[in-house]
Structure formats: structure tokens, C-alpha cells
Amino acid sequence: MRMDKAQRSLNYDATLVVDAGGGDWDLLELSQRVGPGGPEQQWAALNGAGRRQVRTAQGVSILGPEGDQRIGQGPQLRAGPLLAQLDRHYRISMDPRERVAGRRALKMTLQPLSEDRYGLRLWIDVDTGLPLRSERFGEDQQMLERRMVTRLLVHGFAGLSPAPVAAAISDNGWNLPAGFRLVGSALTVPGITGARQWVISDGVAWVSIYQMQLPPGLAVDSNGWRHGALSQVTVRQGDEWFYLLGDLPPETLLSVGRAASAGVH
Amino acid sequence: MSEDIREQLSALMDGELGRDERAFLLRRLEHDAELRAMWARMHLMRDVITHRPGGAGLNLADRVMQTLADEDRHPVSGVQRATRSWRPWLGAAIAASVALMAVFSVAPEIERPGVSALADSAPAPRGALPLGVPGPIAPSLANVSAGVQPVAGERSSLLGTLPTPISAEQMLLMRHGQMVDGAWWVGGAQPVFARPEQRLLVPVSATVNERP
């Protein structure tokens, strides 16, 4: 709850370092300001191409050397009730004696009870509830992605902004990994005619499932990819293509894709 | 105060900031006294340089600050002086944009009138595509403007009216990041920063039985 409050109502500036493997580090500046429409964020890359991303209730803009792009207003989902069921699928432990970026932090470890998902460690600022560090890990504690705040400037809490779209837990009849529920869907996807999107989550991992038809003769790259904890795979059923994206192992994404392709008509 | 913020203030002063960026920066100005001070100082500097009446009251401290600020800037070209631009980063941005145009010119070529969007649908080498885009998807985005608009901003205006293509994959990543929670520890919250060369290819796609 405190994390949610920090995310919805805390004004802050932070510098983040991100290690998604591969030997590269990304340094980012993140600013959040809370306005009447909710939290607004700006991400700025301090290395590399210097891209920026601005997220507001009105949309997402990405500004980079390859051009500036914007997609308009879209639903923003939160895990909501799913968080209450986390202990069914993760072993949760806490350690209150940690320190990150000069601040007291509570370390929370979510160790998955099955191998079809990643684990998560979060260091949560005791004063504000804002996570200061995160680690996603796979089998045998293999580190996939690390993010840490190295500088935090808190400007205080604003009034609680309007709650985002509540996670609409529903059963779409898909055979999903235990604990995952359909939490959102969109009948349109900007830029791709006829595409649809579903979002599933167990409260920790988030997956988008895009369904689209490609013109005859076209195909999607046969390989998927993984970057840090974010994976992508593709499943094809006839003319329908399912493009899955989320922080799950690729093999689990594939099983989700098969379930979706079997259940979507 | 980072260079990036100064650049945004300059762009705001020049009226060239995108809608979302402008709204965000104004919000930030409301809460940040240091930023407001810089904003006021930049206005003062502009007034002096452009001989506006507001600059007549500059005292010695202001002039010292102005001199220091000027020295901080990179050398500016004659063109920039002529346009009285406030952004010393402009030249680098143009160079970077032009250099990347070669990589990101896939969609405009596909959209040439009279050329079938499907004519060259063979998968392109992965390394030659922006952001690791599965090449064959790109032609299906000929109507990209229906849902994704270039932002009226510095780089867009510099590149003229050329529509900036957005790769299918980048759009899907953006959309994922938009929907799945703005928490920074959630994967995909900042998809644009994932570079294709950092990714690990995994051979796990599947084709399931076709429907009867």
C-alpha cells in the first residue's frame, strides 16, 4: 500500500542505474510530479543516445535522435487485488536493516515457488515507501536485471491522485500459469490496424499479448529475445500472430502464447 | 541543474517543446524553486541579448552570471546565431539525427507512392533494423500516422516534414510500458532504452496447428 501511495502521490527526482546484463550499464534520471491527472514522469538517459520518455495521463512521448513519437491516452493498470495473493506463488521474506542511497530501506524478497517465473527483490524506502533498488533473478539465483537509485530528492507527497484503472480480474478461459489473471485488454493498438492487446499479471510480472494479422507473405522474426528480465516470443496460428512481451522466462511466455492462441478467436 | 533541464527550458522559451514535455516542465517549475530561478535568469539573459527593455536593470552579479553561463555553452555556429537559438546542443542533435536517418529510413522508402508496400517483404538482416524490429512487420505500418504521431519538438522540426517512422516493435514496447504500471522496477517501463544489440536472442517462437 505504501509503495502504491509513493507511486501515485510522491514528487521526487531520482538518478537510477540499470544493469540489464550484457556488460552495459544505463544511467537514467527520473522525475515524477503529481498533477490533477495523476503522476507524470520524465525519464532521461544520461548515457547513450540521450533519449527521453515522458509519461502523463494523456499519453507517452519518446524523444530521441531517431525522431519523436507519441501514443495517446491509454489505460494504465495496477496489480491491485492480485497483490493480496502473492504469497500463494512466492515465498515472501523481509529484512528491515538495509540501506540504499543513504536511506533506510526494507528489503523484500519474493522467491517464486515454481520455475515458470522470476524472483524479485525490492528495497523499499522506509520513509516514503518508494522502492530504491530492485533485482530480478531467475533459476539458481541467476541475476537478470538490477536497478538502483543512487540519488533521491524527495519534494513531498501531493494529494492522492485519482486511482488508475483497477485490475479487472476476470477469467478469459485461458490456461495461464498459476496466479496469473487477465487484468486488461484493448481492442485497438496504435499504429497496427486490427491488432488487439491483452495484459495478464500475477502482481509481479506483467505480460502483453498482442494479436495481429499480417498481410500475406509477411512474417515475424522466428526468434524471440530477452533483455534483462524482459522477454519476447512469437506464436503463430494460421494467419494470426501472437506477439508476447513481458518479464517472464521465454518458455513461460511461449506457453502463455499457446494458451492465448487456443482461446482467442 | 543538468544540461538536459537547461535544454528543455531553452526549448520552452523558444516555444518548441512538445505538448507533454511542456506540461511536465511547467509542473516541475511549480515545485522547483531552483528551476524557477534559472527560468527567470534565462529570460533576463534573453532580454539583454535581444535588447529587450526588461534587461536594462541588470546588475553586476547578473552580468557575471550571464558571462559564466555564456562560457558554459559550446561554440555556436553562425546559423544558430542568426536564429538566436538558445540551444548549444542543436548542432550535435542535427548531426546525430542525420546520421541515424540512414538506419531509420526503412518506412519512408516503403511508403513511396506507386511502390507496393509488400514488394520487399523478405526479412531484413536483424542488425540493419532499428531497435531489433522484426523486419517484415514494418511494411504493415504504412498507416502508422493513424495512431502514432510525431511530437512537435526540436528534432521533428529539424527534420522538416518527413514523417518519422516508428518501428512496430518500438510501438508495441511503448504500448506495453504505457499499460503495465509506471513503476520503474517493472520491466518495460522505459522500453526505449533497451537497445537491440544488448538483447539475447532466444529460439523459442512457435507455430501451432492451423485452424481447419
Image (spheres, coloured by chain):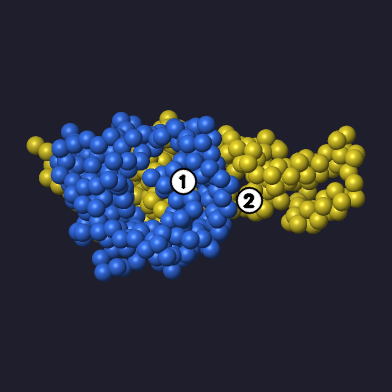
Residue sitting at x 36%, y 49%: B135
Does residue A185 lie above or below A118 as drawn? Answer: above
Contact between marks 2 and 1 (CB within 8 A): the answer is no
Q: Name the residue under label 1.
A: A6
Label placed on residue B25: none
Report in which chain the residue with disc 1 lies.
Answer: A
Say what amino acid the circle numbered 2 marks: Asp
Seen from the viewer's position, the closer of residues A2 and B31 is A2
Seen from the viewer's position, the closer of residues B6 and A78 is A78
In the figure, the shade used to draw chain B is yellow
Does residue A38 lie above or below B72 as drawn? Answer: above
Label placed on residue B4: 2
Residue B76 placed where, x, y %?
A: 76, 52
Callout 2: helix, strand or loop? Answer: helix
The reply to whether residue A185 is in sight is yes
Residue B153 placed where, x, y %?
A: 60, 39
Report in which chain the residue with disc 2 lies.
Answer: B
